[in-house]
Image (cartoon, rainbow, N blue to C red):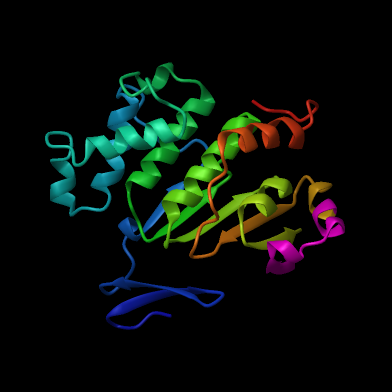
């Protein structure tokens, strides 16, 4: 709903209101494979760009001179598994590491809405679970929308699932009510997308042993990972 003075994004009873005449880019953080990074800058510098997106344009220009909350950027890099990579130039990182830098940058933006498009692409099974756990934890009370092709991950991490086949919605229900047959229908289709929407409260984080067990048992060695 859009009025003269404010904009509201509504989904399944959740509402986010944006100040001003229209939503700004600072209101929505995007995390997606191949997100634009500055190759000649360090991983830390790229993550810090996220904080500039939530500031006025002229303050954003000053961000490189006086970065805001570098400790937070370092924390996010550590949480996505890039501890020790803060000073590495982005063009020296692997595809999976670059993706996690882009992911940390989106979280650094601290926007009320987070949209993550295939945040686990290019990641191995263990890193995929780590990234989704961090996303749930950091999202907190924000609106979180994630597009995934991996049905197991969608059901495991999100409270509501929208299953789409050939551009049509096949189901839109709580994750716990999705049947094995419905998941199989999506998993068997190369063109099938599953959009998972987390509720306002994140699930409790897993302990390290549980995360390792899931990574080892859930994924088949035949699954292709870049």
Which of the 4 image quarters holds residue 6? bottom left
- Residue drawn at x 37%, y 37% is 76
Residue 201 rendering spot, x and y as whole percentages: 49, 62
The answer to whether residue 46 is left or right of residue 164 is left
Q: Splitting the image into 4 quarters, where does residue 87 fall?
A: top left
Residue 164 vertical placement versus 18 (above, below): above
Nearer-the-camera pick, 71 or 223: 71
Residue 90 covered by magenta stretch:
no
Which image quarter is the N terminus in? bottom left
x, y (%) of residue 86? 33, 24
Q: From the image, which quarter does the C terminus lie in?
A: top right
Query: In this picture, is 222 found above or below 117?
Result: above
Nearest to the observer: residue 202 or residue 192: 202
Above or below residue 71? Residue 204 is below
Q: Position of residue 128 (x, y in %)?
A: 59, 36
Residue at 40% x, 20% y: name it.
91
In this view, 179 is above or below 10: above
- Residue at far right of view: 181
Residue 60 visible in the picture: yes
| Extent of the magenta region | 168-184
- Counting the numbered discs, the total is 0
Q: Position of residue 143 (x, y in %)?
A: 46, 63
Residue 122 visible somewhere in the drawing: no
Query: Is 62 left, or right, of 202 in this rendering?
Result: left
Q: Residue at x 33, y 57 (%)?
A: 25
Q: Is residue 173 magenta?
A: yes
Residue 138 appears left or right of 220:
left
């Amino acid at each position: 709903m859009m009025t003269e003075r404010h904009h509201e994004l509504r989904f399944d009873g959740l509402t986010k209101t944006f100040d001003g005449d229209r939503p700004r880019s600072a209101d929505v953080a995007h995390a997606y494979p191949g997100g634009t990074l500055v190759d000649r800058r360090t991983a830390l510098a790229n993550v810090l760009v996220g904080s500039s997106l939530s500031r006025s344009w002229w303050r954003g220009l000053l961000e490189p001179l006086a970065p805001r909350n570098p400790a937070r950027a370092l924390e996010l890099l550590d949480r996505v598994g890039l501890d020790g990579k803060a000073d590495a130039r982005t063009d020296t990182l692997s595809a999976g590491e670059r993706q996690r830098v882009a992911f940390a940058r989106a979280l650094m933006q601290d926007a009320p809405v987070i949209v993550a498009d295939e945040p686990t692409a290019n990641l191995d099974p263990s890193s995929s679970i780590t990234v989704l756990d961090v996303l749930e934890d950091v999202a907190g009370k924000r609106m979180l929308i994630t597009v995934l092709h991996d049905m197991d991950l969608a059901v495991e991490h999100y409270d509501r699932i929208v299953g789409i086949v050939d551009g049509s919605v096949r189901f839109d229900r709580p994750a716990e009510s999705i049947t094995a047959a419905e998941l199989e229908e999506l998993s068997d289709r190369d063109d099938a997308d599953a959009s998972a929407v987390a509720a306002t409260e994140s699930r409790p984080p897993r302990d390290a042993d549980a995360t390792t067990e899931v990574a080892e048992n859930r994924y088949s060695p035949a699954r292709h990972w870049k």
